[in-house]
Amino acid sequence: ASSVVLCGRLHPRASAWAPVSATAPSPRRSRRPGAMEALLNFGQPLDSDLLDRCVRAVYEGTPAERDQAQRVLTQLQERINSEDASAALNWFRVDLILEQGTNPHTKFYALQILDACIKYRWRTLPREQCDGIKNFIVNLVIKLSSEEGTLRSQKLFINKLNLILVQVVKQEWPHNWPTFISDVVNASKANETLCENNMAILKLLSEEVFDFSRDEMTSAKAKRLKESFNADFSLIYQLCDFIMDHSQKPSLLLMTLQTLLRFLNWIPLGYIFETKMVEKLVYKYLPVPMFRNDALACLTEIAGLDIGPAYNTHFEQLFTIVTAQLTSTLPAETDFDQVFESGSEEDARLIQNLALFYTTFLRSHLAIAEKTATAQPPSQHARLLEMALTTLIGISKVDDMEIFKICLEFWNHLASDLYSSECGLTPAATSTLLLGPAPGLGGAAASSTRRQLYAPVLSKVRLVMISRMAKPEEVLIVEDENGEIIREPMKDSDAITLYKTMRETLVYLTHLNVDDTENIMLEKLAMQVDGSEWSWNNLNTLCWAIGSISGAMNEEDEKRFLVTVIKDLLGLCEMKRGKDNKAVIASNIMYVVGQYPRFLRAHWKFLKTVVNKLFEFMHELHPGVQDMACDTFVKIAQKCRRKFSMLQVGESMPFVEELCLNLPSIISDLDPAQVHTFYEAVGYMVQSQSEPAARDALLARLMAMPNGMWQDYMAQAGRDIGVLKDAQVMKNIVNIIKTNERVVIALGHPFMAQLGRLYIDLLHVYKAYSEMINAAVASGGQYATSTSAVRGMRAVKRETLRLLESYIERSEDNDVILQRFVPPLLDPVLGDYVRNIPEARDPEVLSLFTCLINKLQGQMTSEVPRVFDAVFKSTLDMIKHNFEDFPEHRYNLFGLLRAINQYCFPALLSSSDNFGLIIETIKWAFKHTERNIAETGLNTLLELFNNVAMSQVSGEFHRTYYLGLLQDIFSVLTDTLHSPGFKLQSQILAHMFVLVESKAVTAPLWDTATATYADNSTFLRELLTGMFCTSFPNLRPPTAKRLVDGLFEHCRDQATFKQHLRDFLVQLREFGDGEELYLEEKEAEMARKAAEVQKRQEAVPGIINPHATQDEMND
């Protein structure tokens, strides 16, 4: 069969599909037009006409017909996949449908079924049938791709056939089809049209083997295919070389270049650097517009190879000839932004590919490019690096975000590299100068040859960064599509990420030349003031850039620079008319001053002026201004808190005391959410007072207004409890509680003085609203919970619980919490929870007790049974029917169970009646498809195994629960919906196999009354082998036994065990996308890189946002 592949000979269809002994029944024509379900009758031959009508109904029928047809086709596919593969394919004759059918949709449906069979059940087919399918697909591909007209008109269908053929090749090559590569190469030389399609097949195969193999194949199979590809690559290279030298067919040449691109990242280097490949790409194809983009993509792939110094001369030659060729093609004065806007799609691709080539080469081989520029005596290529960088600067101005990101990544790399080499990235860890620039970073500092080389380019890069600076997260005022200034509706995460990279780049550039950065910024600011460049966008990007370099100058330079900036901005605010103009300028003033806490701490009068200006902005009703003023106030209060609580020279009292006196007028125009933010800011000021008595007095003055309202409501409720039912009263109470919660966040443990005043009344209000809700539900049923009155009451209860949780998290005295807070809390909260109907239960109750257990740990053990009895069964009854109802209760219950297991495990053992229910709950948790819940369940199970191992119940536990847990873990492991939990699943399985292998499970796991085994290991091997063979019919007993033996053999080596599990899952053909199987490695790599970035950033003054640092605020 393999000898005829792709060489143009067609075989009779009779032997091309079914085994030799099989006979294909004649298709029966349906006499009932609407009887789609007849397709599901495998007892009758397939009705091809009915199949056509059913598929056509999906695309052209009425909604009812579409639904019915889709359902039938899905059921048919499922039935075929569940039947014996050989018999199913003999019945569903894909070959007849593809050869005789006229409906292209039906053909694609047939190919879907064939694709699934080849991927997942190829090994179950008889050898004759495998050969028949292979021959049929090969012959059909040859037939359709040998003629130019057919190749173009049926492109989509041929592409799908190519994919099917590649799936066959992955199964058959090299063991059953050793001559595949030579067959392809030999056939390609006879027919250029066939050759073009064969190149497409080779490209697909390369992608499958080298790019996607980890997710689709076992590691051993992928290794074998890669070795086969490498062994036969000389034939492929000869074919590509022959085509590039002799073919005149544009489409074939394009396909060859695209196929070559897929090979370049893995082929032996000799084929690249010891042949004429690079010269052909540069001199023959790069100058031709039709081939330019694909040739440049190939050269980019080569430029990205990182293979050590042995090939440096080759890379130097590559840079020289490519840059020289591009320079002759593209004039130095090319306006790339204009070309991108007005040019063709190919022109836009060329600009992007230019950016990719230069950034890829210079990131990997910057020293080589520098060598050409600094060679002595100067060579004819001395200016090539300058030309390349000038091209990149021009491309950086293109108004396309993806292209800009490509350039930005390189500028960030270059600036960081120059800072490391030129400015000495080695500050002492304990240096008191870390907040200032490293030594020798001034603009007038003696420059090295390298810094001089880049100086003209970096000045232009600074201008680009400043002109295009992205919007920081702190800025809430934006211009909408109508040109109006509005409050930003939601955070733009892409813009925030872009800003962080641009900020880091500009900080490096500032260190490399402070004077140049300052001059550019002040010149652009002057043009805003004189109106020559005035626009909202220009002012925004400039101020965002100014704010981004906080910490990159020394204190004296920063002071001089910032005073000039703020003075000009305040003058601009006075000069401009119109609310929108003033809102934009106000936004920028707030952002800039908020970014320079070091300057503010050092200059009290300026700090006071800034804060008073923020208070003015809090009365400005333009959308977003008040929000930003409050947010900026919080940031300044956090970083300068001690300045506000100290008595400053020339002041009669500390600023915070004066603020408390004027507080009602300051917040008079703020909405409730903004008031909460304001109180949090003042809370930071109060927290900075180190004297407890003075701090408590300040806290009382701060909370005087909400406390006064609270006491009024309590007095009124004492006379008439009905007062609490008033809607406005409920809203006000919620706001009072939220205000207290925000102060807790800022103040922490010292909030005890305030909470002590409210605690008992809070619980009384909680209990009162609980009784009102119960009365409403008793009279109105569960629908009462959706009324505005009950929703308002529940809001008070929820905020009460959140306030208590916030304080408990920050408390530093566990004994006070245990003795004074817990006893009065239990009855009103737990009693109310268990008495309420499910719809009226608050998930915050579960969260609060989880917080208590995490805080008090073993001290809560004695209270756990009462908590457990009140919330466990009642909540479990709410969530056990499906995976969707009551999502917050669901998540919080599993979190509570994990906390109890971690810190109060003896309490779980105190009631044997509940223990089985607890195990089932843990199983229910890890069977959820929501990742957080599933991971909580898996973590709880892993911790439970560890707790059990140290207890007296381990024998009984293993005898009762081991096999059920093992089966359920394997159930979720082999379910694609649970693949994100692979890391924890593999840890649990490894632990369970170690328990058996180490004889830690002493009790027999089998039924001793019906069977006898040598030990648990023998029993478990036999059990799992049978279970796998039953659950996965495509697994044969020897394969299943080998997989099970590997689980026992590798259980002590976690890395090897995980790889064995991955291969096991691929062999089961249950995982179409294995990305999540490598999630742990990806997360570990991301964490490692993040740690490296953090370490590098901490060593560079100004890189880290001043509000992201934990400084000591020694002011």
Image (tube, grey):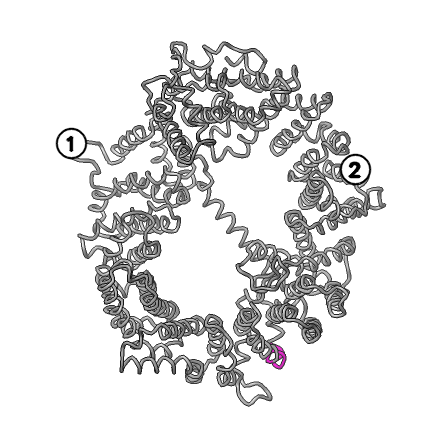
Q: Identify the residue under disc 2.
A: 325
Residue range in magenta is 601-608
Q: Residue at x 25, y 47 (%)?
A: 920
Mark sitting earlier along the chain (2/1): 2
Name the mark nearer the viewer: 2 or 1. Answer: 2
**How far across and how far down the image is residue 694, in percent?**
44, 85
Instruction: Report how far apart the C-alphas of labels 2 and 1 lie in the structure.
Output: 83 Å
| Predominant SS along the magenta part | helix
Vertical position of residue 108 compared to residue 1083: above or below: above
Residue 607 is a magenta residue? yes
Residues at circles 2 and 1 in contact by the CB criterion of under 8 Å = no
**How far across and how far down the image is residue 390, in percent?**
77, 49
Q: Identify the residue under disc 1.
A: 1010
Q: Nearer the viewer, residue 995 or 579?
A: 579
- 568 displayed left or right of 50: right
Q: Quadrant of residue 28?
A: top left
Q: Nearer the viewer, residue 1102 or 16?
A: 16
Residue 69 is a magenta residue? no
Residue 353 is marked as none
> Judging from the image, what secondary structure is the residue with disc 1 in?
loop
